[in-house]
């Protein structure tokens, strides 16, 4: 199913002259890593598997590695580091975990969908399907469909690849397009572009179940949810600023800036720092009647707002609750913007 590039991992460890490694894998892929672990063990590598979840390239298990004295992490399932500036002396090999899809079926599905309706398409995918991306583009082009894509300013993100908090590749389409399609399981990644380019029709193509879905209704729902949260937060006198220690979600300087702004506007502030942002943390502290400023992964407030027991806004939305910007000017992009 997944390609774990075992030989490449072993070559890397040998070239680093080490015989121990910490494997970090998203929960959804963990059930499939038995073969990789056996392979490494048979080659005299001492393997530690991180039992924690990893949500993205923002979430690298430096603390776990340091606590067991390991200097090498193999991080599976993501393209590379996301906003991680300090590797704390640890080397990380990113293995995307490519998943082989039936490119012929995916291409036929897409061609049928586009036929007669759309002449040009903006096409994006996730790292899991990046290896098959070019083949699909070729098939579409053979049918005279104009296919365009773009590249995020993040140097680690390959052309055509997006992540949940970085849809900026869609700003760099070579030409304006009739429609944007994201090839990825579920709708999480298509929503990322849908929020960023809400003026466009955005569809997700799920290559696992071979279904295309218009994400516009989901975007509309998110818009009303965001506005609902902002309006409810405006009335709050007390705010919790949530700070995550995950290396690529640690927006501490932004959190401090927000604290100052809130205090200047006469608001009371409580700061909660945690690695994993969990509802139980807030419930357990019995912090009632607070609004929440989420400075961790922006998708938490968008996809799982119930984590926060009160109205929650992201960094780019703080200006609305403080009256610095008018709610009528709200743009869905604000929920993904990571600075104020
Ligand atoms: S911050 Fe959130 S959306 Fe961005 S890479 Fe990390 S987990 Fe994914």
Image (spheres, helix red, strand yellow):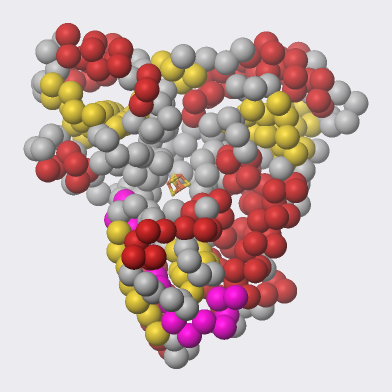
Q: Nearer the viewer, residue 330 or 158?
A: 330
Question: In the image, 51: left or right of 260?
Answer: left
Q: Nearer the viewer, residue 238 or 309?
A: 309
Seen at 42% across and 37% down, the residue is 156
Which residue range is magenta in the image?
232-246
Residue 85 position in % (x across, y down): 30, 49
Is residue 239 visible in the rendered structure shown here? Answer: yes
Q: Nearer the viewer, residue 308 or 338?
A: 308
Task: Give the vertical position of 64 relative to 128 (above or below).
Answer: below
Q: Nearer the viewer, residue 175 or 195?
A: 195
**Quarter of the rendering containing residue 60:** top left
Seen at 49% across and 32% down, the residue is 158
Residue 202 position in % (x across, y down): 72, 41
Seen at 67% across and 29% down, the residue is 205
**Quarter of the rendering containing residue 245:** bottom left
Seen at 57% across and 60% down, the residue is 335
Residue 175 position in % (x across, y down): 73, 39
For residue 59: magenta? no
Residue 33 position in % (x across, y down): 33, 19
Is residue 8 visible in the rendered structure shown here? Answer: no
Task: Give the vertical position of 92 relative to 305 (above or below).
Answer: above
């Amino acid at each position: 199913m997944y390609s774990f590039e075992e030989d490449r991992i072993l070559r890397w460890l040998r070239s680093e002259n080490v015989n121990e490694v910490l494997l970090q894998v998203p929960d959804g892929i963990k059930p499939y890593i038995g073969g990789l672990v056996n392979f490494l063990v048979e080659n005299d590598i001492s393997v530690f598997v991180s039992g924690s979840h990893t949500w993205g390239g923002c979430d690298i298990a430096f603390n776990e590695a340091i606590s067991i004295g390991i200097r090498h992490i193999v991080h599976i399932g993501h393209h590379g580091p996301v906003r991680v500036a300090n590797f704390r002396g640890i080397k990380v090999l990113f293995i995307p975990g490519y998943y082989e899809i039936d490119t012929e079926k995916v291409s036929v599905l897409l061609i049928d969908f586009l036929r007669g309706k759309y002449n040009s398409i903006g096409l994006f995918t996730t790292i899991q399907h990046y290896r098959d991306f070019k083949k699909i583009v070729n098939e579409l082009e053979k049918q005279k469909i104009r296919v365009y894509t773009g590249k995020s300013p993040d140097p680690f993100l390959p052309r055509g690849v997006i992540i949940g908090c970085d849809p900026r590749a869609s700003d760099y389409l070579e030409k304006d397009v009739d429609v944007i399609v994201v090839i990825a399981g579920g709708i999480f990644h298509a929503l990322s572009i849908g929020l960023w380019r809400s003026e466009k029709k955005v569809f997700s193509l799920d290559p696992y179940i071979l279904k295309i879905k218009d994400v516009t209704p989901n975007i509309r729902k998110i818009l009303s949810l965001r506005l609902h949260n902002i309006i409810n937060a405006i009335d709050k006198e007390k705010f919790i600023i949530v700070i995550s220690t995950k290396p690529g979600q640690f927006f501490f300087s932004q959190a401090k800036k927000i604290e100052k702004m809130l205090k200047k506007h006469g608001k009371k502030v409580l700061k909660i720092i945690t690695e994993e942002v969990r509802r139980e943390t807030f419930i357990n502290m019995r912090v009632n009647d607070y609004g929440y400023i989420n400075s961790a992964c922006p998708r938490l407030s968008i996809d799982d707002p119930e984590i926060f027991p009160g109205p929650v806004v992201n960094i780019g939305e703080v200006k609305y609750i403080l009256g610095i910007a008018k709610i009528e000017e709200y743009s869905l992009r604000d929920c993904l913007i990571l600075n104020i």
